[in-house]
Amino acid sequence: MSLTRADIGVWLINLARDTARHEKMEAQLRALVLDWRLFPAVDGKARQAELVLRADPAAYERNMGSPLLPGKLGVYASHLEVWDEFLASPHKVALVLEDDVVFHDNFLEAVDLALAHADEWDLVRFNCIRAKLPVTQARYGRYRLNAYVGPFTGNACYLIHRDVAARLLPGLWPQTRALDHELNRFFCHEYRQFGLEPWASHPDDGGESTITGPGFALVRKFPWYLRLPHYRLKTANYFRRAWWLFRNGLLPRGRS
């Protein structure tokens, strides 16, 4: 299956009060000549009482080793509500953007390449926070389509297929993890989550995250002994990812 930019819808997630980020993203998207729509990000603090009813804070703390911040509630809900809008649209694929993305000169080239090979992935990211132990699934010239045995985190810029979003959405509630950690459990959700390298963008919040605060000031990890369940799950997930890739014939095909 080969797709083009005509097949995608582009959503930009942006908090209404973050006007500087909006303006910066608008200028970049205008330069790329991409049609896009603004999605007003969910304000986790303002909607905390509502959103916490769709979460399991105890499970989150056990899985993540840290408290469930309002910002984590907001970003999780924002992405899934974008998926709802996507499914109500006629588009075959969604390009979902957070408002701290910096596009590289090869961004459109990478997007076009991913669309030309759309049957080879279910969700593909164009940047990351972490991407450990890559296993190459395909090579397109200088690009590599990689699966990851290790943690693969960051939701700032990705493509997702319509049928994949529809299938995943019901199983993503209640929230028990940060969204990127939940999506990295592809062994539970049964889908192919890959990254296209070299990366065609990168996230840059300037140290002023609306999720974790300036300089991660809101982040508070539990003492190490209370994080033991998190460490156990984190270690086990390496084996679960590797086994799923092997079972689906994806591990032997590439070289890490």
Image: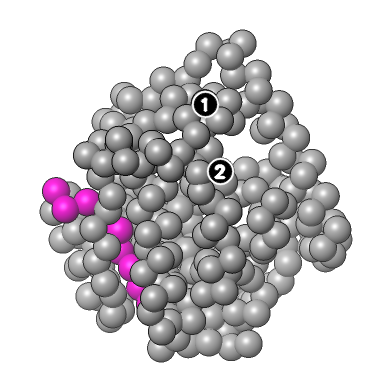
Residue plotted at (52% across, 66% down): 165
Could you say which is closer to the camera, residue 1 or residue 32? Answer: 1
Which label's residue is closer to the chain start, 1 or 2?
A: 1
Q: Is residue 28 magenta?
A: no
Task: Identify the image quadrant of residue 118.
Answer: bottom right
Provide the residue designation for mark 1: 58
Q: Residue at x 25, y 36 (%)?
A: 45
Q: Which residues are magenta?
A: 9-17
User: Is residue 13 on the magenta stretch?
Assistant: yes
Tell me the crowding category of disc 2: few under 14, some 14 to 19, or many 20 or more residues within 10 angstroms, Cα based: some
Find residue 133 and report its horizontal and vertical position in percent: 70, 47
Magenta residues, dominant SS class: strand
- Please provide percent x and percent y for residue 29: 27, 71
Q: Who is closer to the viewer here, 4 or 49? A: 49
Picture quarter with the N terminus: bottom right
Q: Is residue 89 left or right of residue 185?
A: left
Reading the image, the residue beneath label 2 is 181
Q: Which amino acid, mark 1?
A: Ala
The residue depicted at 62 percent of the width and 61 percent of the height is 194
Mark 1 and mark 2: Cα distance apart in space: 16 Å
Q: Amino acid at mark 2?
A: His
